[in-house]
Image (cartoon, rainbow, N blue to C red):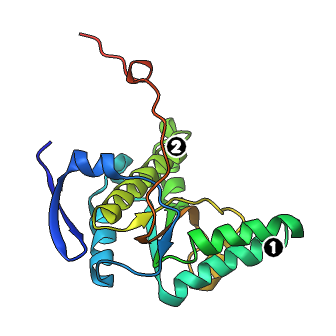
Amino acid sequence: MNIRINHIKKGAIMERTFGEAVKHRRTYYSITNQSPISDEEIECIVNTAVRNVPSAFNSQTTRVVLLLGESHKKLWQIVKDTLKKIVPEEAFVKTEEKIDHSFACGYGTVLFFEDQLIVKELQKAFPAYQDKFPEWSFQTSGMHQFVIWTMLEDVGLGVSLQHYNPLIDDEVRRTWHLPEHWHLIAEMPFGTPVQGPGEKEYLPLEDRVKIFR
């Protein structure tokens, strides 16, 4: 793979191939509320992914919300307020600690939604595939998540992917005045990493990949 990706870290410009960037992508839980790149560059990453990631039937169902500054903090307060109502008090202490020290402490959060209005329109237009469009919609979201995750990490940010939906869906839509037909899929907090990712175990490739000639 000879695709080159600009990598900016600690003032130095480096380059990774696409394959190198994919291998480098990991989950970071120790992050700070700083960023090695500007807000405009973060927006550019999001816009590049949303414009270029493919979707079934070119449906373009993915919707992305970028939360920075106070909006980022507000999201994780919503998460805590929501969980506090349903998590036992003694267990909530650890829950709050995890949110504060792994997600809320970051620089921003990317929210991934899927537009159910488009999904339903496609189901009506192509009834032979109606049971597949929700599945393809999730696949499209997953590709957007992976691309944005990889690109954010490639510029020096630490990233993780969280799923507090559907518990927070209604409050998130109310807070940022989002359409009811936007279905929340995942939350992606990010910030400058202060600690490396944990160890990762890999299953043997021969158990996961089959090649026939």
SS class of the residue under badge 2?
Answer: helix
Ranked by sequence position, the earlier of labels 1 and 2 is 1
Residue at 29% across, 78% down: 37
Task: Work out whether 67 lies above or below 56.
Answer: below
Whether residue 110 is visible: no
Residue at 68% across, 62% down: 166
Residue at 72% across, 75% down: 80
Q: CA gap, disc 1 to disc 2?
A: 32 Å
Task: Work out whether 94 lies above or below 207.
Answer: below
Q: Quadrant of the N terminus?
A: top left
In this figure, which residue is indicated by the disc labeled 1? 84
Q: Quadrant of the C terminus?
A: top left
- At label 1, which amino acid type do we have? Lys
Viewer-side residue, 148 vs 24: 24
Dot 2 surroundings within 10 Å: few (below 14), some, or many (20 or more)?
few
In this figure, which residue is indicated by the disc labeled 2? 135
Q: Position of residue 142 (x, y in %)?
A: 45, 51
Viewer-side label of 1, 2:
1
Is 153 left or right of 171, judged from the image as shown? left
Viewer-side residue, 9 vs 189: 9
Q: Position of residue 3 (x, y in %)?
A: 14, 50
Viewer-side residue, 39 vs 20: 20
Q: Position of residue 88 (x, y in %)?
A: 88, 65
